[in-house]
């Protein structure tokens, strides 16, 4: 019975770092958008960088996270729309 408990701890421990890595990656992608946002309509390719980053968030983390990024980073004001 104790061996089973050790296996549970081992499997939980192996899942947790991946989850933390995912959170860090999502935050890195959101930061890329934050950094690029002031450049919209001022520097070339800023729209493309934001759009590609949103597409990556959508692909890797789901539509709800992409919608959240658009809303929280106030991208609607710059022309991005919330996907249905």
Image: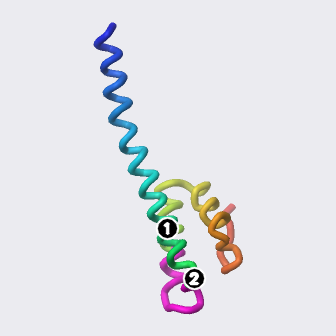
Residue drawn at the location 48% of the way across and 78% of the way down? 49
Position of 29 relative to 35 (above/below):
above
Q: Is residue 71 magenta?
A: no
- The percent position of residue 71, horizontal first and vertical second, equals 67, 65
Q: Which residues are magenta?
A: 39-51
Q: Quadrant of the C terminus?
A: bottom right
Kind of element beneath mark 2: helix
> Dot 2 surroundings within 10 Å: few (below 14), some, or many (20 or more)?
few
**Residue labelled with disc 1:** 31
Residue 38, image x, y percentages: 57, 82
Q: Position of residue 59 (x, y in %)?
A: 49, 59
Q: Which mark is residue 8?
A: none
Report the residue that reaches farthest toward the top.
Answer: 1
* Residue corresponding to mark 2: 38
The residue sitting at 43% across, 51% down in the picture is: 22
Question: Would you say 30 lies left or right of 6 here?
Answer: right
Residue 56 is left or right of residue 65, and the answer is left
Are discs 1 and 2 less than 8 Å apart at CB?
Answer: no
Tell me the CA gap for discs 1 and 2: 12 Å
Write the residue at 59% across / 57% down.
63
Q: Dot 1 lies on which element? A: helix
Please, which colouring scheme is shown? rainbow
Q: Earlier in the sequence, mark 1 or mark 2?
A: 1
Above-or-below relation of 33 to 59: below
Mark 1: give few (<14), some (14-19) or many (20+) Cα within 10 Å: few
Q: Nearer the viewer, residue 62 or 27?
A: 27
| Residue at 35% across, 16% down | 5
Rendered-image quadrant of the N terminus: top left
Residue 10 location, quadrant = top left
Left or right, 23 with reference to 11: right
Q: Quadrant of residue 47?
A: bottom right
């Amino acid at each position: 019975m104790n061996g089973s408990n050790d296996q549970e701890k081992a499997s939980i421990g192996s899942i947790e770092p991946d989850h933390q890595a995912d959170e860090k990656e999502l935050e890195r992608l959101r930061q890329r958008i934050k950094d690029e946002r002031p450049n919209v309509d001022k520097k070339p390719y800023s729209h493309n960088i934001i759009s590609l980053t949103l597409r990556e968030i959508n692909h890797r983390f789901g539509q709800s996270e992409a919608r959240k990024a658009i809303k929280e980073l106030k991208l609607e004001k710059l022309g991005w729309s919330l996907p249905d």
